[in-house]
Image (tube, helix red, strand yellow):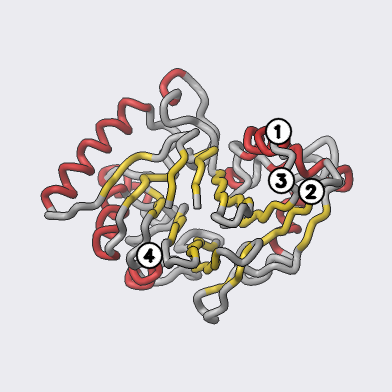
Amino acid sequence: MNVTVWGCRGSITSPGRDTLRYGGETTCLEIVTDGGDRIVIDAGSGLRRLGQHILKDPDVADITLLLTHAHWDHLVGFPFFRPAFFSKYTITLCGGSDPRISVLKSLRHQMEPPYFPVDMSVMKAKFVTGCTCGCSECGNELAVGSGSHRCESIPLSHPNGGYGFKLTDNRGRAFVLLTDNELRYRHETGLDREGYVEFCRDARLLFHDACYTEEKYERTRTWGHSTYKDAIDLAIDAGVERLGLFHHNPDRGDDEIDGILGWCRSYISGRGSGLDCFACAEGMTLAV
């Protein structure tokens, strides 16, 4: 499968001169499976440009949308997702244990007055809400699209809850997204650290929340995000091959991310690990 980053910024869109290289769009990923299925994770501001890209591909008609949670930075792009306005497209909604209610309700609510000038009824795509990405608590799994990949979910340690996702192909190669996940504090709906280690075990590629420095975390503990050191330690302990630092702090410019990445690579070397660590950036596509 190929994973393309359309948005990797956290909390709020952050355009400007200082975010040109890593980007300022909020969370949105596109996964194209070996079988040609199109899976989108999160509807952050990056979803707008992804929608324009999809419209240019005449072969795409079915889209699966996985939603990690309903905080605004993960929903804000949906009203501007142009495929949703055309009857050609079928959009299957997934996320958590009850997407039939929660995902559709969250997407519809942000387009209700007084938040948006048009409501969801103007969208002509067919929305399918019977999909449930398997929750690790109950051991369920979902074969997404053509069934060439398996999807699993896990509760995030984050205020108001949420879900992380793992997509695994038929050869056992896995991509994991754990954005908005606080590893050093267990929120009410979250798991302990070992639960996340096992979920990520031997993944080919992991994108994990790396929002805070150690100094910043002292003031933001319980806010639902991790330090980049926490993300590295998790990846090493889980035997992950590649780690993408994700959910960049909105106040963090490109040069600061470069400096953090240099520290991360030195820390990984000091731990005697061969982990490949990089900072996620808009426009990058990675093969898993």
In the image: residue 99, left or right of residue 168: right
Which residue is painted at 51% across and 59% down in the image?
159
Residue identified by numbered label 3 = 60
> Would you name the residue on which mark 1 appears?
56
> Label 2 vs label 1: CA separation?
13 Å
Other-residue count near label 2 (Cα within 10 Å), few / some / many at <14 / 14–19 / ≥20:
some
Mark number for residue 89? 2
Between residue 76 and residue 63, name the one nearer to us: 63
- Mark 2, mark 1: which one is toward the viewer? 1
Disc 3 to disc 2, C-alpha distance? 8 Å
At label 1, counting other C-alpha atoms closer than 10 Å, the crowd grade (few under 14, some 14-19, many 20 or more) is few
Question: Nearer the N terminus, badge 1 or badge 4?
Answer: 1
The residues bearing labels 1 and 3 have C-alpha atoms spaced at a distance of 9 Å
Question: What numbered label is drawn on residue 103?
Answer: none
Q: Tag 4, which secondary structure?
A: loop
The answer to which quarter of the image holds residue 97 is bottom right
Residue appearing at x 48%, y 40% in the figure: 8
Mark 4 residue type: Cys
